[in-house]
C-alpha cells in the first residue's frame, strides 16, 4: 500500500538503519543508508574472511545514536487491541517482519496476556495453539513471517481447519515495495500472503491502518470463535507496526461480543424428533458434536431418552466410554433411523470403501445400512464449505439435513423428542436399553480378551503399553492430550473415559507432526488447570519438528510422553505392501522390516537422548514389557515435579 | 502430506470375502495345492512372516489389531489360511504363489502354531482395573 507522507521524525528509511547494521552482521547483502533501493547489492564476502569494519561494529561496537520515532508506536496500540481479548499465550518463532509488534508485546505489554513462548518452528506454534484450545476452550494467537513462516505453519493450519479449531495467525509482511528494506525482507514479502492459506482459513484480512487493525483483529477473533470454529489469518504490514499512530486514528478498541451459534430450524428439529421417537432402532453417531463438556451431558440425555446406541467417532470426547449405550461403528447396520452430529464424513459412516484394487484399481464401495434407513444430520460445517481442499468428503444424501451447530441444537431436540415419544413406545424403548446393557458388557469382555493376546511380547504390545500407562495414572486427574500413531485405539476401548478433557481427539487433517506440538499446547492448558497430561507419542510424528521438546522444557510444561516407537511410518508401509500384492510383486525391504522408504531403522533413533538434550527427563529404549511399569512410575514422579518426561518404548506396529 | 486412508477392517466385507474363499476351496486344483505342513520350520516361518509383511497388519506375534485380525495363538487350519490369503478380495491384499510360495506359507503356519497360549485376561490385573 502507498505510504502516507512522512514527517522527518517518522522517516522509515532512517529508522531502518538499525536493520541495515543487523543485516550486515548476518552476512547478507545490504544497502547503506541513503542508497537507492534499486542499486544492486554488493556481493556477500565468503564467511571465512575477517569481518568488515561495519560487521565488527555491528557485532561488538556501540551503535550510533539513531533518531527515535516520536509518538505512540502503532504496534503498542496493536498490543492494546490484543490484550482486550484475554489471550493468555503466544507460541511463536521470532521473525523480523513482526519485530515491532514483538518488541511492543514484550516491553510495552510486559510479556503478559499474551506471554510469548519460544518455538522452534511455526508448525509447532500452530500445533500448540491447536492442542491448547482443545484442552482449555480458549484460542491462542501466533505470529510468523508472512511468507516463509506461514509456509511452515500451513500444514498445522490445515489440521486446525479440518479439526474445526479456532486460532489467530498474524503474518508479518512489508507491503511497501518502494521503501521496504531490500534483500532478505523483500524475499520475505508478498502481495497477498493470506492467499497461501485462504483455502483453509475461515477468514483473513490485510489491515491498512491501525483503526482497521483493531476492527480486523476483533472481527478475526469473533469469526474464529463462532461455530463452526476455524483458524483465521491477518497479514500485518511491517510499516503499520513500526510507524507511530497517525493523528486522525481514533485508537478505539471495539468490544468483543460473542456471536450465538446457529441452531437447527424448528421444523427440521421437530421432524427429526418425530423420526427418532418412532424408530425401532435409532442410532446416534457423533464426531465433533460436543464442543464443550456440556455437549456430553446433553448427548447422554438424548441417548437415555431414546435408549439409543451412540457411536462416538472420537474427534472430540462426545460420550462417556463407560456408558452402556456406547457402541461400535457396526451398530449402524441395524438402524432404521441414524442421526449424525458434526460428522466429518457421513458417507463413510453409512458406506464402506474397500481398498482391494478391484474395478481397475479404484476399490469397492458398498452400503453398511438398510435401504430404508432414514438419515438426519446436524452439522455447522455446512455453513462453511470451501471448494479446493476436499475435507467435505464424499456426497451423502440426507433425509433431514440441518446446517446448524449440534450442541446448540441439542436442548431443542431433546425437548422435541420428549414430546414426540408416545406412551405406547415407552416399554419398547426401555427394552432396547436392557439389550444394549448386555451387549456392552459382552463387548468389554471381548476387548479385554483381545488385549491379553501377546501381553508379554517384545516389542511391547500396544495394549500392554496403554494399560501399563493407565494403571499408573488412573488416580490422577489425567488428560490424554494426544495419541498419535495408531495404537489400535486401546485407550478408547479400555480406559474408562468419562470427562471431556480425558480425550482431545486427533489432528483433523491427518497431517503427521500434530501429536508432539498439540500435546505440549494441551499440557500447557492442563498445567494451568491442575490436570496431569499424558501423550502417546509416535516416532514418525515426533521427527517432523522435534524442537517443540525444547519449548516444553524451556517453559516448564509438565507432560508425560510415552512413545509408541514402532520404528516406521507404518501406515505407509501397509500401503506399499498392499499395492505390491495387487501387482503380484515381492516387496523390496532393503535391510529394513518394511518396504524401502517406510522404516525408521538403521540407525535406530535414540529419542530418549534427543529429549534429554533438550532438557527433558528421559529413559529408553524400553523393550522388555516387565520394565515398562516401573519406568512409567519414575517418569510420573518427574512430571508431578513440573518437568516433562519421555519414555522411548519399542512397540508392536499397531 | 500423508495419506492415512481408512484404518479399520470392515466386518461387512469380511463376510463376502469368506463366502468367496469358500467357493474357491471347492475347486479341485486348489485343494491339491494346499501346502504340506509337516516339513515346515517355525524359525523360517517367523522370518517369512516378517519378510512378507504379515507383521505389518497382524503384529509380530500375529496378535492382530485394528489393521488385521488375530492369527495366533491357535491359528485356524492351514487349508483355510491358504485359501484365504491366496484369494482375498477384501481388506487384506492377496498373496499369490508368485510372491509367497507354498513352502513359505507352510513355514509361516508352523510359526503361528508355535506361538504359545498367553494368559487369560482374568489373570492380568491391569486388564481388570
Image (cartoon, helix red, strand yellow):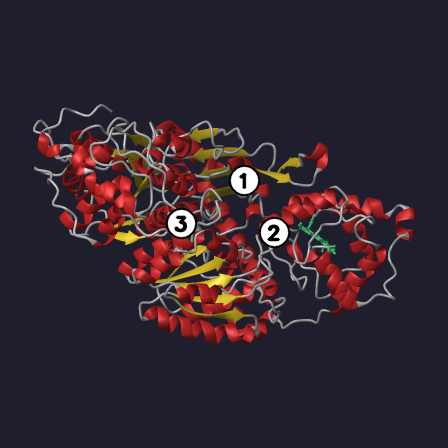
Q: Is residue A38 depicted above or below A50 in this figure? A: above
Q: Earlier in the sequence, mark 3 or mark 1?
A: 3
- Which image quadrant for residue A617? bottom left
Q: Nearer the viewer, residue A403 or A212?
A: A212
The C terminus of chain A, quarter of image: bottom right
Of badges 3 and 1, the one in the foreground is 1
CA–CA distance between discs 2 and 3?
Answer: 42 Å
- Which image quadrant for residue A640? bottom left
| Chain at numbered mark 3 | A
Regarding mark 3 in the picture, which secondary structure is present there? helix
A535 sits to left or right of A458: left
Disc 3: which residue: A300
Of badges 2 and 3, the one in the foreground is 2
Q: Is residue A636 depicted above or below A401 in this figure? A: below
Q: Nearer the viewer, residue A55 or A594?
A: A55
Q: Earlier in the sequence, mark 2 or mark 3?
A: 3
CA–CA distance between discs 1 and 2?
Answer: 30 Å
Disc 2: which residue: A598
Disc 1: which residue: A349
Expressed as whole percent of the image width and height from the top left, the position of residue B21 reads 79, 47
The N terminus of chain A, quarter of image: top left
Q: Is residue B91 visible?
A: no
Label 1: how many residues lie within 10 Å, few (<14), some (14-19) or many (20+)? many
Expressed as whole percent of the image width and height from the top left, the position of residue A365 reads 64, 35
Regarding mark 2 in the picture, which secondary structure is present there? loop
| Chain at numbered mark 2 | A
Expressed as whole percent of the image width and height from the top left, the position of residue B61 reads 67, 64
Regarding mark 1 in the picture, which secondary structure is present there? helix
Q: Earlier in the sequence, mark 1 or mark 2?
A: 1
Discs 3, 1 touching: Cβ within 8 Å = no
Amino acid at each position: 500500500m502507498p505510504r502516507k507522507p512522512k514527517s522527518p521524525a517518522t522517516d522509515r528509511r532512517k529508522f531502518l538503519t538499525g536493520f541495515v547494521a543487523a543485516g550486515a552482521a548476518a552476512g547478507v547483502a545490504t544497502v547503506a543508508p541513503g542508497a537507492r533501493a534499486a542499486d544492486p547489492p554488493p556481493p556477500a564476502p565468503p564467511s571465512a574472511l575477517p569481518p568488515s569494519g561495519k560487521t565488527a561494529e555491528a557485532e561488538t561496537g556501540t551503535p550510533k545514536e539513531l533518531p527515535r520515532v516520536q509518538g505512540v508506536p502503532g504496534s503498542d496500540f496493536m498490543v492494546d487491541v490484543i490484550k482486550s481479548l484475554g489471550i493468555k499465550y503466544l507460541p511463536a518463532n521470532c521473525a523480523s517482519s513482526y519485530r515491532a509488534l514483538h518488541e511492543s508485546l514484550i516491553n510495552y505489554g510486559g510479556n503478559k496476556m499474551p506471554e510469548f513462548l519460544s518455538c522452534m518452528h511455526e508448525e509447532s506454534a500452530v500445533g500448540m495453539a491447536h492442542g491448547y484450545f482443545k484442552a482449555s476452550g480458549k484460542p491462542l494467537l501466533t505470529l510468523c513471517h508472512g511468507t516463509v513462516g506461514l509456509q511452515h505453519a500451513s500444514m498445522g493450519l490445515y489440521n486446525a481447519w479440518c479439526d474445526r479449531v479456532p486460532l489467530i495467525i498474524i503474518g508479518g509482511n512489508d507491503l511497501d515495495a518502494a521503501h521496504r528494506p531490500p534483500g532478505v525482507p523483500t524475499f520475505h514479502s508478498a502481495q497477498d500472503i493470506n492467499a497461501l492459506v485462504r483455502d483453509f482459513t475461515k477468514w483473513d484480512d490485510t489491515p491498512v491502518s491501525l483503526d482497521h487493525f483493531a476492527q480486523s483483529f476483533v472481527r478475526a477473533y469473533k469469526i474464529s470463535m463462532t461455530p463452526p470454529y476455524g483458524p483465521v489469518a491477518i497479514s500485518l504490514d511491517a510499516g503499520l507496526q513500526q510507524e507511530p499512530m497517525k493523528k486522525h486514528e481514533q485508537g478505539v478498541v471495539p468490544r468483543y461480543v460473542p456471536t450465538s451459534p446457529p441452531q437447527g430450524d424448528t421444523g427440521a428439529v421437530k421432524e427429526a424428533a418425530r423420526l427418532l421417537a418412532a424408530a425401532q432402532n435409532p442410532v446416534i453417531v457423533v464426531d465433533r458434536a460436543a464442543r464443550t463438556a456440556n455437549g456430553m451431558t446433553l448427548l447422554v440425555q438424548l441417548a437415555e431418552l431414546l435408549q439409543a446406541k451412540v457411536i462416538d467417532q472420537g474427534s472430540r470426547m462426545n460420550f462417556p466410554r463407560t456408558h452402556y449405550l456406547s457402541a461400535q461403528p457396526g451398530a449402524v447396520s441395524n438402524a432404521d433411523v441414524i442421526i449424525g452430529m458434526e460428522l466429518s464424513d457421513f458417507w463413510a459412516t453409512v458406506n464402506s470403501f474397500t481398498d482391494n484394487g478391484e474395478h481397475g484399481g479404484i476399490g469397492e464401495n458398498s452400503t453398511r445400512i438398510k435401504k430404508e434407513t432414514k438419515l438426519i444430520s446436524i452439522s455447522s460445517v455446512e455453513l462453511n464449505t470451501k471448494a479446493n481442499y476436499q475435507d467435505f468428503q464424499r456426497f451423502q444424501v440426507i433425509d433431514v439435513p440441518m446446517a446448524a451447530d449440534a450442541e446448540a441444537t441439542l436442548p431443542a431436540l431433546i425437548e422435541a423428542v420428549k414430546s414426540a415419544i408416545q406412551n405406547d413406545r415407552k416399554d419398547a424403548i426401555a427394552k432396547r436399553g436392557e439389550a444394549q446393557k448386555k451387549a456392552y458388557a459382552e463387548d468389554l469382555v471381548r476387548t479385554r480378551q483381545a488385549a491379553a493376546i501377546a501381553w508379554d511380547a517384545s516389542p511391547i504390545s500396544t495394549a500392554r503399553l496403554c494399560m501399563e500407562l493407565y494403571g499408573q495414572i488412573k488416580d490422577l486427574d489425567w488428560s490424554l492430550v494426544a495419541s498419535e500413531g495408531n495404537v489400535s485405539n486401546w485407550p478408547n476401548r479400555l480406559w474408562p473415559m468419562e470427562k471431556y478433557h480425558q480425550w482431545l481427539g486427533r489432528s483433523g487433517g491427518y497431517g503427521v507432526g500434530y501429536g508432539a506440538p498439540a500435546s505440549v499446547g494441551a499440557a500447557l492448558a492442563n498445567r494451568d488447570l491442575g490436570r496431569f497430561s499424558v501423550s502417546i507419542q509416535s516416532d514418525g510424528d515426533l521427527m517432523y519438528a522435534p524442537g517443540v521438546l525444547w519449548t516444553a522444557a524451556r517453559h516448564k510444561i509438565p507432560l508425560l510422553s510415552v512413545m509408541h516407537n514402532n520404528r516406521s511410518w507404518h501406515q505407509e508401509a501397509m500401503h506399499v505392501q498392499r499395492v505390491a500384492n495387487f501387482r503380484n510383486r515381492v516387496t523390496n525391504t532393503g535391510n529394513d522390516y518394511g518396504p524401502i522408504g517406510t522404516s525408521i531403522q538403521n540407525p535406530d533413533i535414540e529419542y530418549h537422548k534427543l529429549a534429554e538434550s533438550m532438557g527433558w527427563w528421559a529413559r529408553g529404549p524400553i523393550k522388555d514389557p516387565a520394565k515398562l511399569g516401573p519406568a512409567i512410575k519414575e517418569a510420573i514422579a518427574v512430571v508431578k515435579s513440573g518437568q516433562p518426561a519421555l519414555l522411548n518404548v519399542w512397540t508392536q506396529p499397531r | 502430506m500423508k495419506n492415512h486412508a481408512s484404518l479399520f477392517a470392515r466386518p461387512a466385507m469380511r463376510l463376502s470375502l469368506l463366502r468367496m474363499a469358500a467357493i474357491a476351496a471347492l475347486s479341485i486344483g486348489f485343494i491339491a495345492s494346499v501346502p504340506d505342513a509337516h516339513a515346515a520350520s517355525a524359525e523360517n516361518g517367523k522370518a517369512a512372516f516378517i519378510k512378507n509383511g504379515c507383521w505389518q497388519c497382524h503384529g509380530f506375534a500375529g496378535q492382530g489389531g485394528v489393521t488385521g485380525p488375530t492369527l495366533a495363538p491357535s491359528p485356524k487350519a492351514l487349508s483355510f489360511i491358504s485359501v484365504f490369503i491366496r484369494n482375498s478380495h477384501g481388506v487384506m491384499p492377496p498373496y499369490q504363489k508368485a510372491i509367497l510360495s507354498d513352502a513359505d506359507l507352510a513355514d509361516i503356519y508352523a510359526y503361528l502354531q508355535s506361538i504359545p497360549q498367553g494368559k487369560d485376561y482374568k489373570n492380568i490385573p491391569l486388564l481388570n482395573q
